[in-house]
Amino acid sequence: MKDIRKVVIPVAGWGTRSLPATKNIPKEMLPIYNKPVIQYVVEEAQRANIQDVIFVTNRDKSVIEDHFDYNLQLESVLQRAGKLDKLEEVRRVAEMVNVMSVRQKKQLGLGHAVMCARDLIRDDPFAIMVGDDLMFGGVPGIGQLIEVAMAEKLPVVGVMEVPWEKVSKYGIIDGEEVAPGVFRVKDMVEKPAREDAPSRLAIVGRYVLTPDIFDYLDKVKPGKGGEIQLTDAMQSLAHDKGMMAVRMSGMRFDAGDWAEFLTANIYFALQDEDLRYELLGMLKNFVQFN
Ligand code: G1P
């Protein structure tokens, strides 16, 4: 399999779970400590040597592309003020990756969003990262998938065990564990009822796919929720040609869930030595720690 150089990041969703915060601000731009959610996702891609980021976007999301571009006015203000560390930081973000974007003009589902990137992907294998799913750990989450895709020469999805009462929120796989944490996918189903779920191994927004997925997406009929589901196309691809799944080793936060979003904020703030003790002191004022 060729090296994975491109990632598709669908960002056209409305962010209804995070309203009213997302009424006029894309959910991907909400901050986790001092960086917007989307920057963590792009940093994960960059750490896995992905150079080209394709945002599948809509008319209200151009601020996401701007975040990864130069802001010359701001840079000259910082330069004149001698705030060179901040200057370096904002430039670094502009230089992280190449940015491309394509409009998803109708919200017809994740499978449809991926289809929108077809002409930018062409014949190369590529990654998909769902912008709400934040992964943290030693090895970049998407890098774990790339490693297995290269070794097996097959597409790969990232999975994690979720509680049975949450299986209906995810794509769920049925797999045979062939090495610790590595599964050969036998089947997959989008958001099954608890009693129909083949396991509690949930797809967590990280994929490495081959371009033949587009032929399967062409044929997919609207599935769960009337949407064009990526899971349905991957199910056919897995049956015909094989697919792997990898249990992701890092921590995961769903940025669209308030409890997880806020936990992620505190987690990252606590990593900053300058903030840690002040923050802990303030939290202690209104929380009883054991
Ligand atoms: C999408 C996918 C689902 C996957 C999930 C991970 O669902 O369709 O298979 O488990 O992302 O975040 P969504 O959350 O967009 O409804």
Image (cartoon, grey):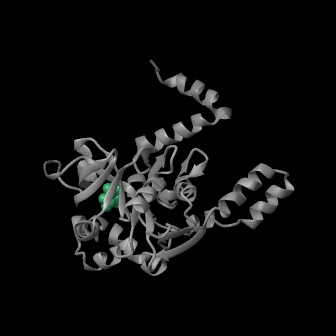
Give the side of residue 140 with respect to residue 67, left or right. Answer: left
| 107 or 220, nearer to the observer | 220
Residue for point 45% across, 81% down: 119
Give the residue displayed 35% in from the left and 65% down from the top: 154
39 lies above or below 223: above
- Nearest to the observer: residue 201 or residue 84: 201
Q: Is residue 131 visible?
A: no
Image position, residue 7 (x, y; %): 49, 66
- 135 left or right of 188 in image: right
x, y percent for residue 150: 43, 62
x then y, percent, for residue 130: 42, 59
Residue at the far left: name it: 195
Query: Residue at 52% of width from left, 74% of height from top?
Result: 101
Q: Is residue 88 visible?
A: yes
Image side of residue 179 versus residue 261, left or right:
left
Residue 256 in the image: above or below residue 5: above
- Tell me: residue 117, above or below residue 288: below
- The N terminus lies in which quarter of the figure? bottom left
Q: Quadrant of ligand 1?
A: bottom left
Position of 275 compared to 29: left or right?
A: right
Q: What is the quadrant of the C terminus in the image? A: top left
Depicted 20 relative to depicted 217: above or below: above
Whole-percent x, y for residue 281 in the image: 59, 24
